[in-house]
Amino acid sequence: APTVSFQPSPAPNETLAPTFINETQQEFLERTLTTDGQISVLGSPQNEAFAVLAENFPDLDPNNSPTDRLQIAQIYALNTLYFALNGVGWSMRTDWTGPADVCGDEPWIGVLCEDNGTVAELNLTSNDLLGQLPSEIQGLSSLRKSIMKGS
């Protein structure tokens, strides 16, 4: 089974900086994480992840605050990962694609968060992962470690 270990650089993600224009969630994501148009392709992991974000978190506004921009990026990145790696077939997927806060009182299964609400680690071992890791994982700008293994 394939194993993916991911250790991003500690450099800050400047693409999440404010733009000082009134942009929608989709425009923000097209500018920062999915620049290839996949967010608009029906059935793509990016499109499915955006649909979940827009439905479950309509009040997150990229124009409001760095916190909202971070949350949009994290939720979208995690849900893109979910759809790209056959999340519906995962053996452990509690809270994924739902309206629960990623780093709330009960973080999504396999997600470890820092006290400041940033995703620090992913542990999706033995979770029946299938597919290719999407580039949108870069939206998890505070990710220190990720362990993913197929079945």
Image: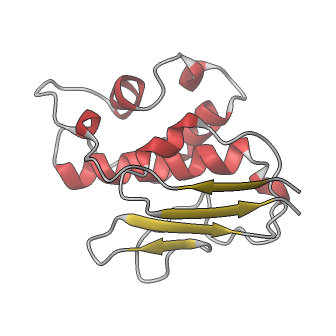
View extreme (bottom): residue: 105
Instruction: Identify which residue is drawn at 67% across, 51% down.
Output: 82
Total label count? 0
Query: Residue 93: where, in percent of width, then height?
Result: 71, 67
Residue 8: x %, y % from top left: 44, 50
Q: Residue furthest top?
A: 37
Q: Indicate the colouring scheme.
A: secondary structure
Q: Residue at x 74, y 47 (%)?
A: 85
Left or right: 149, with 114 as reference point:
right
Measured along the vertical axis of the image, is residue 128 above or below residue 48? below
Q: Look at the image and tell me in which quarter the N terminus lies.
A: bottom right
Q: Is residue 37 left or right of residue 71?
A: right
In percent of width and height, residue 98 lies at 58, 61
Residue 30 relative to residue 149: left or right: left
Q: Nearer the viewer, residue 41 or 120?
A: 120
Quadrant showing the C terminus: bottom right
Image quarter of residue 147: bottom right
Vertical side of 38 occupied by 145: above or below:
below
Using the rendered image of the protein, determine whether residue 60 is visible from the camera's viewpoint. no
Q: Residue furthest left?
A: 20
Taking the spot 64% from the left edge, 20% from the top edge, the residue there is 41
Q: Who is closer to the viewer here, 144 or 133?
A: 144
From this viewpoint, is residue 136 visible?
yes
Classify 68 as above or below 135.
below
Q: Quadrant of residue 84?
A: top right
Q: For the point 72% across and 29% down, which residue is it?
A: 43
Q: Nearer the viewer, residue 2 or 120?
A: 2
| Residue closer to the observer: 9 or 71 | 9
Q: Which quadrant of the view contains residue 22?
A: top left
